[in-house]
Image (spheres, rainbow, N blue to C red):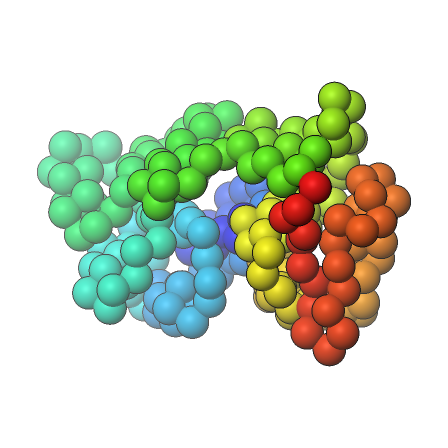
Amino acid sequence: MRLLIVEDEKRLALSLARGLTAEGYAVDVVHDGREGLHQASEGTYDLVILDIMLPGLNGYRVCAALRAAGHEVPILMLTAKDGEYDEAEGLDTGADDYLTKPFSYVVLVARIKALLRRRGVGAGASPVHVHGDLKVDTAARRVFLGEDEVALTAKEFSVLEHLVLRAGEVVSKSEILEHVWDFAYEGDPNIVEVYVSTLRRKLRAGLIRTVRGAGYRLETSP
């Protein structure tokens, strides 16, 4: 899952990004409301964490602009304010949830997971994906092959999760890079091949097919 943090307190933003990256998310960070609106409009995100007091455009205006443009990405608003009016205004502009600073990091992660689950349930999706003898639980972040649980690193799971959510479709290397790594990644794009190779070793060689010149496909048959 790919997240965007729009927060002008740079220390807080980078701390959140480090923690959420360790949780297995791909995280992009911007510190200005106008840049946040541009990034959220142009990028493909699963959730936006949006501060209210921002330079350029405040969070209310960013949220309202995204909704007016038809973007349905879940938005979790952050603010140092704690009045009911502020919360109502945030939700009225289209935010999905609201968290007042200072907040517990554990609570933030729980809210993020709840919003992502809610979005999945709304789309008729299940957190447990079964393909033959492969079972991937995206909520618990656990993988089983037959009766055996397979231990994956956070990045390995994220690559597999993206393929599972598009099972049977061809997913390009650039799409995987975009969703699993952040926009600031400037390393070798062949890193995707490395992770796919590792997944094949840990799971089964024929599970992830290479479609020459196009990308990868998770086979849906047993």
Q: Position of residue 116 (x, y in %)?
A: 42, 40
- Point 46% across, 57% down: residue: 45
Q: Position of residue 58 (x, y in %)?
A: 27, 58
- Point 32% across, 41% down: residue: 122
Q: Position of residue 132 (x, y in %)?
A: 66, 38
Question: Which residue is situated farthest in the right direction here?
Answer: 201
Left or right of 19, for residue 222: right
Q: Position of residue 210 (x, y in %)?
A: 76, 64
Left or right of 213, for residue 121: left
Q: Work out whether residue 56 or residue 156 is closer to the camera in this orientation and state it.
A: 156
Q: Work out whether residue 220 or residue 172 is closer to the camera in this orientation and state it.
A: 220
Q: Quadrant of the C terminus?
A: top right
- Point 74% across, 31% down: residue: 145
Eyeballing the image, is 65 above or below 127? below
Q: Work out whether residue 205 or residue 137 is closer to the camera in this orientation and state it.
A: 205
Q: Is residue 151 visible?
A: yes
Eyeballing the image, is 113 above or below 12? above
